[in-house]
Image (tube, rainbow, N blue to C red):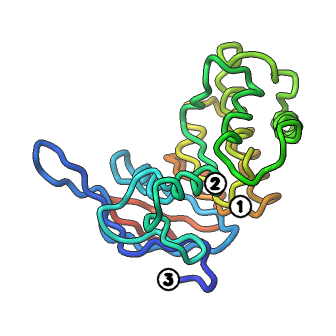
Amino acid sequence: MTIPNSHIILNDIQKNFMAAGESIPALNDINLSLGKGEFVSITGHSGSGKSTLLSIVGGILMPTRGSVSVHGKDIYNSTENELARFRAEKIGFVFQSASLLSSLTVKENLLFPTIFASGRSGKHDHEAEALAYLDMVGLAEKAYVYPYQLSGGEARRVSLARALMNKPEILLADEPTGDLDEETEKDVMNLLERFHKESDITFMLVTHNEELAKRATRRLKMKKGRLTENT
């Protein structure tokens, strides 16, 4: 189904990987249309293609066939520099691993993505934004510590704040609560939903957790590289 004035359109996406000299399909004939500000969850077994799909939407992994259009522009019909700018300015990534840079403080980890975004305000404004986002996730007092000094839940909340630093249009979360305890999982999910609602971000959540998936306004399921609506 194509949504009028769609934000994201995936058209006939196919992705193959080479293994032992053989082309193995990971995604088969994916067609998807998302409206601006939608919250979509994607569930499915490990190896079903969920993370591959998110990587293609985020401009990380080029499809073997098909197109990914954002605001009507095929992102893979771009130069490498244009695609890098798209990732830096339009996409916020949240992964199961917080992936913080160990040599940087928490605040510096938030500032790092702003290096790659053009047309933004000056250094002092970036720093003020970083501190504001840390305050939003309840970690203002951790701005000057290093990642090894954080708990797992704190590191995940820092990664959420970092994902929002460039005010992305699209938030892609790949198992963002996968290894967290129940209480921390609830806190992280509440933050994700708050970001989505306050910023009108188009939000795609990959999760094994069916209870989390039910919180989305639209539910999809991956099975053997194919995508279906989960009603």
Q: In front of the other: label 2 or label 3? A: 2
The residue at the point 53 percent across, 74 percent down is 73
The residue at the point 87 percent across, 28 percent down is 140
- Distance CA(mark 1)–CA(mark 3): 21 Å
Is the residue marked by circle 1 packed among few (<14), some (14-19), or many (20+) residues within 10 Å? many
To which residue does mark 1 refer?
Answer: 201
Q: Secondary structure at mark 3?
A: loop
Q: Position of residue 188 (x, y in %)?
A: 71, 40
Left or right: 63, with 20 as reference point: right
Nearer the N terminus, badge 1 or badge 2?
2
**121 up-or-down from 132: above or below:** below
Is the residue marked by circle 3 packed among few (<14), some (14-19), or many (20+) residues within 10 Å? few
The reply to whether residue 102 is visible in this rendering is yes
Q: Secondary structure at mark 1?
A: loop
**216 up-or-down from 60: above or below:** below
The reply to whether residue 186 is visible in this rendering is no
To which residue does mark 3 refer?
Answer: 1
User: Which residue type carries mark 3?
Assistant: Met
Splitting the image into 4 quarters, where does residue 146 fall? Answer: top right
- Distance CA(mark 2)–CA(mark 3): 21 Å
Q: In front of the other: label 1 or label 3? A: 1
**Dots 1 and 2: beta carbons under 8 Å?**
yes
Splitting the image into 4 quarters, where does residue 28 fall? Answer: bottom left
To which residue does mark 2 refer?
Answer: 171
User: Which residue type carries mark 2?
Assistant: Leu
The residue at the point 58 percent across, 82 percent down is 3
